[in-house]
Image (spheres, helix red, strand yellow):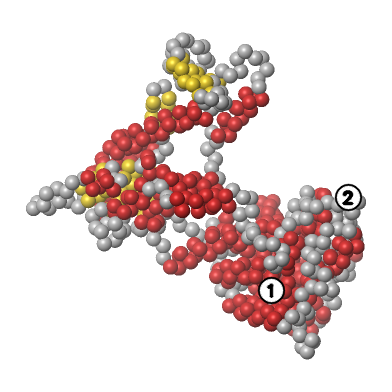
């Protein structure tokens, strides 16, 4: 056992010398392509384990190619014994068609020739792209010996070749004169790069050059000789060299490299299509759909302009300051209510709070526009928030009152009723998601929903940026309102012990909880809407679909319980809760549509009064078609997001409401009606 571990360690940290250069070779990566597990695949698997190699197994040609393009294996072993599962030679050719395979050794496992048949020629295998043939032998030591010979032969040679190519490629791209010396510092090559005419000139030399480096090739710039003040190019070069030598590689870089490799062996039409793909990938807004001209759909364009940009247009002389600058604290409020103080009418309504069809407007009416305190007490009690935070119900009630008091009841839409509605939706979704969130996540989600729009001025981020508001200046025109909501929520919470729901939890729990709350509230900012949705689809929906259908590749298992995926789930949850109005029952949907339209109308009115840019011109109260605005909002923002969320949380009732409400708005639009309902229905 000790001998085997020693061999593994030696192979895993191999040092390769090329003259005076010392290179460390990473552990060898091996890809086994076998349609079914058998003694032969097991033999190679355990041989890789013994040799200290990293090993992947693929069962289909498609998963094999995908895995290879991701890992760039040095050795590939393909099962050539049977043709009914896949064509081994076709698999080899498809891999050879990629650029990374230039340095890969591909081994064909073939059946033993019977005594009455002549041994087959290896030429067909070589023509298909194989390097070696391995006669079927499931002995681990036989497989081990084969792999070790390949490593010390072809793989080691390819590694040295790549190292040399890298050196000469670097020389070819260098814009300065270069001297390369031998071990005893005799200059072997003197290379000069010129900007015009003959681009470069390499001259052999044989004279000694002093250097402080004793154990490596001396690659030294001499372009600054003869001048005490180095040029700009000389000052910049070392930094650029360090940047190019960085080993950090972003995922998008890997994608671009794969596409570049695929282009080299593709037909012209495919290569041109991939060029267009690369152009798109090099843009900054990868997740935001590109709209046509405003004439095509002004409602959608205005919604996007108003919700997905920060305005970034500043008109001199215009300052927008909040009309409400003094934030209420609990000392200005009546004493916290108790459970016994809840009137029967409110208690009866709250009995139905777990239903999606819960009517938040009825609660708003009976609580005199204080629905957040009452609903918060009920929901937080159901999820055991006080127990988790180790705080009393009195502290929780005081906190809810402070938060609700800092919502603007004068806002048509962004008031405490909206906060209560988002809290209700979040609690409903927590009951539907698939157990991937722990209690800390649940508590964070409920708190984030409660505070996510606190002190909202009833104006969009674009308006605040264009008006040069104090908050826009404070937050550098970036996620202005969302940053303010989270900052103020924590300020209000921790400044007075009577309402500090976090005062009894330890520092680590508090930091984790705080980070989760901030992340969720910032996710409600619409400029990254499509980024959040696309990440959720690719990281949550697609892997879950693959799990349910069965997957062929054993390379990259995915789970919704990974921390990064839990973050995506929480972001998607609060995003859906924040804009769930189109998925509510029709009467509630219509009421919310009227309220948000009125708030946008008021913003347009104020923009015109102050001479500010009108962010959403279609929201002119004299000309706006509310049905058209709702149709655009559903088409552009809601449908795809809720399709993805429904695929995760299974919400058929919501999707039916969405379909019914969309039909309502389409009917009104077809009849050229611009109001919430037909006049006869009103």
Quadrant including the N terminus: top left
Above or below, comparing residue 364 to residue 9 in the picture: below
> In 3D space, how far apart are the residues under numbered discs 1 and 2 (Cα atoms)?
36 Å
List x then y, in percent, for residue 248.
54, 40
Q: Give the residue pinned by disc 2.
A: 316
What residue occupies the far front of the structure in this picture?
A: 197
* In this picture, residue 118 sits left or right of residue 64: left
The residue at 82%/70% (across/down) is: 620
Which disc number belongs to residue 571?
none
Residue 49 position by quadrant: top left
Residue at screen point 51% across, 24% down = 198
Q: Observer-nearest residue: 402 or 546?
A: 546
* SS assignment at label 2: loop
Q: Which quadrant holds residue 423?
A: bottom right
Give residue 513's position: percent from left, percent from top. Answer: 68, 57
Q: What is the x, y in percent for residue 128?
A: 28, 48
Q: Residue at the spot x=77%, y=75% of the render? A: 625
Image position of 512 with respect to 393: above or below: above
Instruction: Say whether marks 1 and 2 touch (CB < 8 Å).
Output: no
> For the view shown, which residue lies furthest in the left direction?
116
Q: Which residue is mark 1?
A: 631
**Residue 671 visible at all:** yes
Is residue 53 among what the camera can see?
Answer: no
Give the left or right position of residue 21, taking residue 562 as reference.
left
Location of residue 233 (image quadrant)? top right
Q: Residue at x 48, y 18 (%)?
A: 190
The single residue placed furthest to the top in the displayed view is 207
């Amino acid at each position: 056992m000790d001998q085997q571990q020693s061999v593994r360690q030696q192979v895993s940290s191999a040092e390769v010398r090329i003259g005076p250069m010392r290179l460390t070779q990473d552990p060898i990566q091996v890809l086994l392509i076998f349609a079914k597990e058998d003694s032969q695949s097991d033999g190679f698997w355990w041989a890789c384990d013994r040799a200290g190699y990293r090993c992947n197994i693929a069962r289909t040609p498609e998963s094999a190619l995908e895995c290879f393009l991701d890992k760039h294996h040095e050795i590939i072993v393909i099962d050539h014994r049977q043709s009914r599962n896949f064509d081994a030679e076709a698999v080899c050719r498809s891999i050879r068609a990629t650029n990374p395979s230039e340095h890969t050794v591909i081994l064909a496992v073939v059946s033993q020739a019977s005594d009455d048949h002549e041994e087959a020629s290896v030429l067909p295998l070589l023509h298909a792209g194989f390097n070696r043939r391995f006669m079927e032998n499931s002995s681990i030591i036989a497989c081990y010996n084969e792999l070790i010979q390949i490593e010390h032969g072809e793989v080691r040679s390819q590694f040295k070749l790549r190292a040399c190519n890298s050196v000469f490629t670097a020389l070819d791209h260098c814009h300065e004169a270069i001297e390369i010396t031998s071990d005893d510092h005799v200059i072997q090559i003197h290379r000069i790069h010129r900007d015009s005419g003959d681009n470069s000139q390499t001259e052999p030399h044989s004279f000694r050059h002093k250097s402080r480096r004793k154990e490596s090739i001396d690659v030294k710039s001499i372009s600054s000789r003869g001048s005490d003040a180095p040029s700009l190019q000389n000052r910049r070069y070392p930094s650029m060299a360090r940047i190019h030598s960085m080993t950090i590689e972003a995922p998008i870089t890997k994608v671009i490299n794969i596409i570049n490799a695929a282009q080299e062996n593709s037909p012209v039409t495919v290569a041109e299509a991939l060029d267009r793909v690369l152009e798109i990938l090099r843009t900054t807004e990868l997740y935001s759909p590109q709209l046509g001209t405003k004439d095509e759909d002004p409602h959608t364009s205005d919604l996007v302009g108003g919700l997905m940009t920060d305005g970034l247009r500043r008109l001199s002389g215009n300052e927008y300051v909040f009309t409400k600058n003094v934030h209420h604290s609990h000392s200005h409020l009546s004493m916290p209510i108790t459970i016994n103080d809840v009137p029967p009418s409110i208690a009866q309504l709250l009995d139905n709070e777990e239903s999606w069809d819960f009517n938040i407007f009825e609660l708003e009416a009976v609580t005199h526009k204080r629905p957040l305190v009452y609903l918060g007490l009920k929901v937080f009690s159901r999820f055991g928030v006080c127990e988790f935070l180790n705080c009393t119900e009195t502290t929780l009630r005081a906190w809810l009152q402070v938060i609700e008091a800092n919502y603007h009841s004068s806002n048509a839409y962004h008031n405490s009723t909206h906060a209560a509605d988002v809290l209700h939706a979040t609690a409903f979704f927590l009951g539907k998601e698939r157990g991937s969130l722990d209690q800390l996540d649940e508590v964070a989600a409920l708190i984030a929903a409660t505070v996510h729009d606190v002190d909202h001025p009833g104006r969009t981020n674009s308006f605040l940026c264009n008006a040069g508001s104090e908050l826009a200046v404070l937050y550098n025109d970036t996620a202005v309102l969302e940053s303010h909501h989270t900052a103020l929520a924590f300020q209000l919470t921790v400044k007075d012990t009577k309402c500090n729901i976090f005062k009894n939890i330890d520092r680590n729990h508090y930091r984790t909880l705080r980070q989760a709350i901030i992340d969720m509230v910032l996710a409600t900012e619409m400029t990254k809407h499509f980024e959040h949705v696309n990440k959720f689809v690719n990281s949550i929906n697609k892997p879950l679909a693959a799990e349910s259908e069965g997957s062929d590749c054993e390379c990259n298992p995915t789970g919704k319980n990974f921390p990064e995926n839990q973050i995506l789930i929480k972001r998607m949850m609060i995003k859906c809760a924040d804009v769930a109005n189109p998925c509510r029952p029709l009467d509630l949907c219509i009421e919310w549509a009227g309220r948000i339209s009125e708030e946008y109308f008021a913003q347009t009115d104020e923009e015109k009064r102050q001479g500010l840019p009108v962010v959403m011109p279609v929201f002119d109260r004299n000309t706006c078609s509310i049905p058209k605005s709702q149709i655009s909002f559903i088409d552009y923002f809601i449908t795809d997001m809720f399709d993805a969320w429904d695929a995760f949380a299974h919400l058929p009732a919501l999707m039916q409401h969405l379909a019914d409400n969309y039909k309502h708005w389409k009917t009104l639009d077809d009849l050229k009606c611009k109001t919430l309902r037909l006049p006869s229905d009103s």
